[in-house]
Image: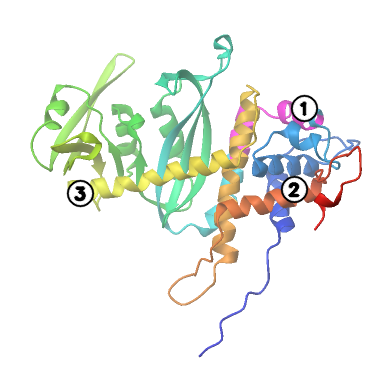
Amino acid sequence: MPNTPQADGEIHEDQLLNFLVNALDEEVDLGLGANAEIDAEDIYEVLVGACADGTSISELCDTSEDSPHENTVLYHLREKFDLTSVERVGNALLQQDVLEVLPEQVEVVADLHLRPYYGDEDETEGLYHSEAKRGTTAFHAYATLYARVKNKRYTLAVRRLVDGDTASTVLAEFLGLLDGLDFGVKAVYLDREFYDSKCLTLLHAHNYAYVMPTIRWGKTIKQELSEGWSRVIQHELTGKLDGHSWTVEFPVYIDCTYQNGRYDEHGVARHGYAADAPFIETPRDARYHYAKRFGIEASYRLSEQSIVTTTTQNPIVRLLYVVVSLLLQNVWRYLHWEYVATLRRGGRRLWKWSFEEFINMLCRASWTALAVRRAVPANQPPDDRFHR
């Protein structure tokens, strides 16, 4: 029996922290003066540590002996950036290393993510307002672009949304970004917020295959989605801009499935998908391929586990926290594939290394680096109950 190949080395917790701090230091310029009492790396250690620990900057600094003062960290995060620079630097950070491991052709997913705001109604300026969801109409909103490779999701870009932003303006930016990257796009998967004439026109103009669910707008599509069996129809939407109108025509794949009593409903459920892709020939194909985008929700759940806790309404700081939380996922997937997986015939073997374990390792490393308090003062010596 051949010997099992042994690993050439190990990646320790402190090295994971170093990797992330070095990545931030390479792309983010805090502009600290030559006589500054702290280094940028000191701030990055706190930022990464707070994300991994899911705590606030203030809490982490308050319980650490070797960290800068919380006011110093927060001052630099507030004052040294603007939104444009955070988006630019954030996208560079997210694409760093990741582009090396992407294949020649990938599937991409664009999505709008709304984080509810429950604060003072008089302080919602700069937030994104939308239909009521989770008891509010004001949100910290972000648009994200992902590459999907064999069920792994790599964030390529993130953008903050404000009132006045539309799905088409976001999509135009993302498609322009994709045009400049060095890989082919198999298809673009979009959620229903992108279903309008402008977005469909953009997709056709950039010549990208796409899949997205339809919305029951208008009498025609409502009728089509209320009767009949699985089929493909031609549909059209009309758009208007600056007094000019145009019509975009596209195929809609109507997929019918039996409810089988689910959700206390019976009969047939009909779902329409606007799709134009060479690998989609039937309505079932459209439903199967669109289901791939649901994995994007897992990225948001992971992000909620690894983001700085904050009450600040500063949009620049909040966006920076989102970027770092998404960066943690990218780094975990990159290191898992590039360093932890075992090379072998027929493909790499991915050893079990969960994201939770990854952020726990980062958290312990930051606690050590910052000398987080691990004992509290006592007014008397511990008695026998504290010993074994």
Q: Main secondary structure of the magenta part?
A: helix
> From the viewer's perspective, is 199 left or right of 3?
left
Q: Which residue is mark 1?
A: 75
Q: Secondary structure at mark 1?
A: helix
Badge number at residue 366: 2
Residue under the image location 62 percent in, 78 percent down: 6
Q: Marks 2 and 1: which is nearer the front?
A: 2
Amino acid type of the residue that numbered disc 1 sits on in the rendered structure: Tyr
* Proximity of marks 2 and 1: CB atoms separated by less than 8 Å: no
Q: Quadrant of the C terminus?
A: bottom right
Q: Is residue 135 visible?
A: yes
- Distance from label 2 to label 1 (Cα)? 21 Å
First reached walking from the N terminus: tag 1 or tag 3: 1
Depth check: give the residue in front, 242 or 350.
350
Which residue is denoted by mark 3 in the rendering? 284
Type of the residue with mark 3: Arg
Q: Is residue 363 left or right of residue 325?
A: right
* Spot occupied by residue 132 in the image (x, y as percentages of width and height): 41, 19
Q: Which residues are magenta?
A: 72-90
**Hey, what amino acid is under mark 2?**
Ser
Residue 319's place in the image compared with 332, above or below, is above
